[in-house]
Image (cartoon, coloured by chain):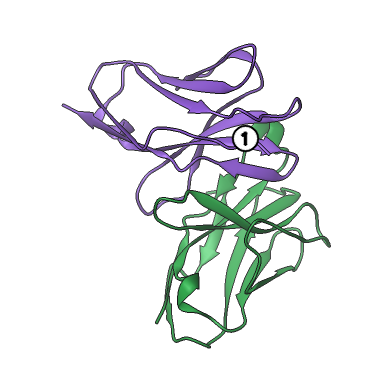
Amino acid sequence: LAKTTQPISMDSYEGQEVNITCSHNNIATNDYITWYQQFPSQGPRFIIQGYKTKVTNEVASLFIPADRKSSTLSLPRVSLSDTAVYYCLVDSNYQLIWGAGTKLIIKP
Amino acid sequence: NAGVTQTPKFQVLKTGQSMTLQCAQDMNHNSMYWYRQDPGMGLRLIYYSASEGTTDKGEVPNGYNVSRLNKREFSLRLESAAPSQTSVYFCASSEDPQYSGYTFGSGTRLTVV
């Protein structure tokens, strides 16, 4: 099974682009990668999901290189409300491998 | 609002007591899940139900039982609570996680003393 590793914490400033990288060295061919956002006292909220190359939606982009051993969540022009914990998840046919989460703090 | 509803939001138990955590979803999802979240450890899967009538163990099933009562409801039972089960418990549901991910409830904070 893949093991996911992501930084424990990151700081940035309002208006900046933030990139959070997750490594998943043993990812299997059919596994896909999902990122979630979690605020205190709430459940995780789906952000974006991908299998390879680049995926973009209204809130984020997800970059996955050809070897799929890592993925990068990109948040454009962050605001104070983006302060949260971000989780990387590798879904391997119901074997769900969650990262420990990256606490992102956005400063004014 | 559509989503996943968990009850109760908070609970304190004494060691050895039993309780059931309730979860219901109104999105007509086939699959439902129970997770626990401990500081610094992310989320760990306790049990899941891929469809009505089926349940399977996740990563940390010991000390727990589940019931998929119908398509909407999936309950988690602690028969004899232990301090190690102090945690925040999340229920989630999905239709096809490969395309739409999981929808989580707001959690139950359980303390076992």
Q: Residue at x 62, y 35 (%)?
A: A90
Q: Quadrant of the C terminus of chain B?
A: bottom left
As drawn, A24 above or below A66: below
Q: Name the residue rendered at 39%, 33% in the picture.
A: A7
Q: Amino acid at mark 1?
A: Val
Closer to us: A90 or B55 = A90
Is B59 drawn above or below residue A107 in the view shown? below
Residue placed most toward the observer, B72 or B108: B108
User: The chain coloured purple carries which letter?
Assistant: A
Give x and y (percent) for residue A33: 61, 29
Q: Which residue is mark 1?
A: A90
Question: Outermost residue, front direction?
Answer: A25
Against A21, is A46 above or below?
A: below
Q: Position of residue A83 (x, y in %)?
A: 30, 35
Image position of A41 (left or right of B71): left
Report x, y in % for residue B58: 68, 56
Chain that is coloured green in the picture:
B
Residue at screen point 51% across, 40% down? A99
Q: Quadrant of residue A55?
A: top right
Chain of residue at mark 1: A
Q: Does B34 appear above or below A91? A: below
> Residue B41 at x, y = what percent?
46, 51
